[in-house]
């Protein structure tokens, strides 16, 4: 099978159950820095063990919120990339059954997608660690602009975004839904993920073992490239534009992405 964007479009048009697994690479196009890129990744500025380690969050929440104030609660300023918009269009055309994402930036929903499994949670939902009172993304934005650490209005305990920290288990229902989709898929397209974080990387593994065709598109090589039916190491912006142009030529997508 030829490693080309056209081959991916051909597979998509023949597929009965396509799923997409997305990672940070599709959001860097939107101006959101990723975590691991040498020199530019967030872990060059912040200590990953401190930012997302759950025990450290409880002992020193200020460190996380210094990070979150700059990089999480500014997500509302970002706009979906061409990949986000393209996937939303494919969902509307019933060509894409489910999006499974490692990202917490909510850009899939902003682009118009609704069938999204957020493996690592979302800052759209925030809860008091004591009484479980709910706070929206907008309420948290207001709180972190006023306080070093946002606290519950009712019991004054710390509020935590509903994202999965190191040391916490992923939500079992979300994870099982992702695995179920992987088992049903006849085509799994990975976009912008290095595939080094588990259990998210289990999704293409399960899909491949269940008989799906596996496509991996990422700027850098991944450990799955040798197992993929198509592996494209290319810029995600360029991939998205070429993919869209080919779909438009086939009258599958009408609107400009």
Image (cartoon, grey):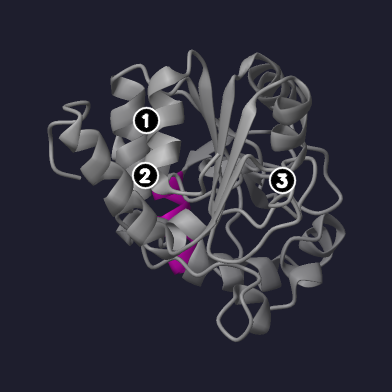
**Crowding at label 1, few (<14), some or many (≥20) Cα neighbours within 10 Å?**
many
SS at badge 3: loop
| Earlier residue among tags 1 and 2 | 2
| Earlier residue among tags 3 and 2 | 2
Q: Position of residue 174 (x, y in %)?
A: 67, 25
The residue to which callout 1 is attached is 113
Please indicate, yes or no, whether residue 154 appears anywhere in the rendered image.
no
Residue 6 or 83: which is nearer the viewer?
6
| Earlier residue among tags 1 and 3 | 1
Q: Quadrant of residue 47?
A: bottom right
Q: What span is colored magenta in the figure?
A: 137-146
At x 43%, y 38%, the residue is: 7
- Gap between marks 1 and 2, in whole Å? 8 Å
Relative to residue 197, is residue 102 drawn left or right? Answer: left
Relative to residue 239, is residue 171 drawn left or right? Answer: right
The residue to which callout 2 is attached is 84
Foreground label between 1 and 3: 1
Q: Work out which quarter of the rendered image holds the C terminus and state it.
A: top left
The residue to which callout 3 is attached is 164
Q: Position of residue 26 (x, y in %)?
A: 45, 55
Residue 211 or 174: which is nearer the viewer?
211
Q: Position of residue 237 (x, y in %)?
A: 35, 60
At x 33%, y 28%, the residue is: 90
**Which SS does the magenta portion mostly show?**
helix
């Amino acid at each position: 099978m030829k490693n080309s964007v056209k081959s991916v479009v051909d597979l998509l048009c023949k597929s009965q159950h396509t799923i997409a697994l997305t990672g940070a690479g599709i959001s860097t196009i939107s101006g959101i820095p990723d975590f691991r890129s040498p020199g530019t990744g967030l872990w060059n500025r912040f200590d990953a063990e401190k930012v997302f380690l759950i025990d450290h969050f409880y002992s020193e929440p200020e460190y996380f919120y210094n990070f979150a104030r700059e990089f999480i609660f500014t997500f509302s300023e970002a706009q979906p990339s061409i990949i986000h918009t393209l996937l939303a269009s494919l969902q509307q055309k019933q060509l894409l059954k489910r999006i499974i994402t490692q990202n917490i930036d909510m850009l899939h929903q902003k682009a118009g997608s609704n069938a999204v499994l957020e493996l690592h949670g979302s800052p759209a939902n925030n809860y008091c660690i004591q009484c479980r009172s709910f706070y929206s993304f907008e309420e948290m934005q207001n709180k972190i602009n006023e306080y070093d650490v946002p606290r519950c209005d009712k019991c004054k305990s710390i509020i935590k975004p509903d994202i999965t920290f190191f040391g916490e288990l992923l939500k079992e229902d979300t994870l099982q839904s992702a695995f179920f989709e992987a088992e049903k898929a006849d085509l799994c397209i990975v976009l912008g993920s290095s595939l080094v974080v588990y259990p998210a990387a289990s999704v293409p593994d399960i899909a491949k073992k269940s008989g799906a065709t596996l496509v991996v598109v990422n700027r850098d090589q991944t450990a799955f490239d040798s197992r993929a039916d198509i592996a494209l190491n290319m810029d995600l912006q360029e991939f998205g534009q070429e993919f869209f142009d080919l779909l438009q030529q086939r009258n599958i997508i009408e609107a400009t992405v």
